[in-house]
Image (cartoon, helix red, strand yellow):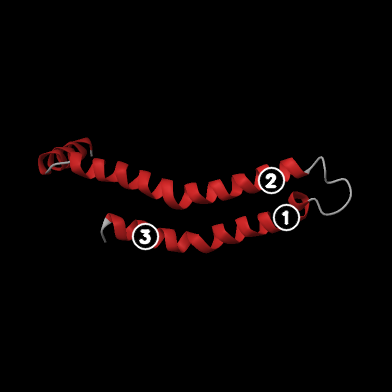
Amino acid sequence: MSLIDAIQKASVVRLRPILMTDIVGIIGLLPLALGIGEGTELLKPMAIAVIGGLVFGLLLVFLFLPALYYIFEKGKQDSYTGSDVENTENHLKKEE
């Protein structure tokens, strides 16, 4: 399996639980963010900030982190050559 296929498959597997968690949090904070009810004036800015953080975190998890993982893994794969792998295997055999 290629690196891109693995990242796509992992993203699809993690999509549902992360979305469920974020949607529940956002729905729970909507009454505060909209100012519904008495005494919400003090909590409204906090609710808006938390909802913004949940949305921003969702974007980070599904856009930034897979791209960052791809960049680091691709660099790691490119830096290894056949001789490096052979040297490592020989070194590990000597330690045993």
Q: Earlier along the polypeptide chain: callout 1 or callout 3?
A: 3
Q: In the figure, residue 75 lies in which quadrant?
A: top left
Q: In the figure, residue 3 lies in which quadrant?
A: bottom left
75 vs 20: above or below: above
Closer to viewer: mark 2 or mark 3: 2
Residue that carries the numbered disc 1 in the rendered image: 30
Q: Residue at x 25, y 45 (%)?
A: 74
Residue that carries the numbered disc 2 in the rendered image: 48
Q: Residue 29, position in %: x, y?
A: 73, 52
Q: Give the number of the disc on residue 8.
A: 3
Closer to viewer: mark 1 or mark 3: 1
**Is residue 90 left or right of 3 when viewed as pictured?**
left
**Is residue 73 left or right of 18 when viewed as pictured?**
left
Q: In the figure, residue 49 lies in which quadrant?
A: top right
C-alpha distance separating marks 1 and 3: 31 Å
Q: How many marks?
A: 3
**Is residue 53 left or right of 70 when viewed as pictured?**
right
Secondary structure beneath label 3: helix
State which quarter of the image contains the N terminus: bottom left
Amino acid, disc 3: Gln
Q: Residue 39, position in %: x, y?
A: 88, 45
